[in-house]
Amino acid sequence: MKASESHFLEVRGLRYHVRRWPKPGAPKMFLLHGWMDVSASFQFFSDALRGEWDLYAPDWRGYGLTQWGKADCYWLPDYIADLDFLLDRLQPEGAVNLVGHSLGGNVASLYAGVRPERVARLVNLEGFGLPPTRPDEAPRRYARWLAELHERPRLRPYKDFAELAQRLRQSNPRLSAERAAFLARHWGRDAGKEGVVLRGDPAHKIVNPVLYRYEEVRACWQQVRAPVLWIDGAESATLKRLELDPAQHAERRNSFANIRHVVVPDSGHMLHHDQPEALARLIEEFLR
């Protein structure tokens, strides 16, 4: 495996961890992980790249080795702001190459519309957005949020890293034992008598009290000027889980003015785990 480095930056009052697979002087690529994931998940993708790239992958606030947030729960706009401040530190001049998976894809797509001059090319891996909401859902959502603040969620403990690796393989049968063992060591931490728990703040599981306003999100997507590569996993169940039909999926893709859509065979939602070699070929071709 290619060796990575850990760098720590002060970002908006938090100690942020950024994993780097260094290649000074090579083109930079910024890799943004998804919900309840960590930056090390891009290890297999990094290993599969044929060209020379200087890779940066932050752990979002409350994940991996980055400090947990200081509020009761987490807000999507904070990720957008964190990304803006990180890019100011890591590539202050010019436009960047952004690759985002799931949550990271949603953040990258919004950022590319809010700061279109800062994004050269955008790769969205299964960052579909969320289901549209109605105003009459607000009272129930706020009530649920208050209840979850009182009865805060917990993360399931595992006996050891081997049990966590086994659980990862149950969730994704495409994972080899070797890759699952690697991920378990980065996704999990030793919590002593409690066992092994995920390296994430349980507050990520608290519902967002503010409804997802699809029209506002789409307005941001429509401002993206960068070419977009939108990649889905052929066997992903995420669209079904989000209750988005093919017409809604197409409408969301078509919000971007310059887009190429690719479906990767034999892969689920975690494309960078399932088919890192195919993903690397597609992304390198697109960025070059």
Image: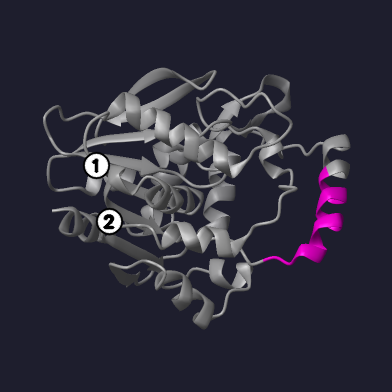
SS category of the residue bearing label 1? loop
Percent x, y for residue 121?
26, 52
Whether residues under marks 2 and 1 lie with C-beta atoms below 8 angstroms apart, the answer is yes
Question: In the displayed structure, would residue 190 be above or below residue 105?
Answer: above
194 with respect to 98 (left or right): right
Q: Mark 2, residues whose alpha carbon is within 10 Å: few (<14), some, or many (≥20)?
A: many
Return the residue nearer the eye: 139 or 21.
139
- Locate the N terminus and report the quarter of the image it occupies: top left
Q: Give how far apart the Cα atoms at labels 2 and 1 are.
A: 10 Å
**Magenta stretch holds residue 250:** no
Question: In the displayed structure, would residue 255 be above or below residue 7?
Answer: below
Mark yes or no: residue 168 visible: yes
**Residue annotated with mark 1:** 95
Residue that appears at 42% across and 48% down = 114
**Residue annotated with mark 2:** 226
Q: Mark 1, residues whose alpha carbon is within 10 Å: few (<14), some, or many (≥20)?
A: some
Q: Quadrant of residue 41?
A: top left
Q: Which mark is residue 39?
A: none
What secondary structure prevails in the magenta region? Answer: helix
- Of mark 2 and mark 1, the one earlier in the sequence is 1
Q: Amino acid at mark 2?
A: Ala
Return the residue nearer the eye: 124 or 1.
124
The span picked out in magenta is 133-145
Q: Amino acid at mark 1?
A: Ala
Residue that appears at 88% across and 49% down = 143
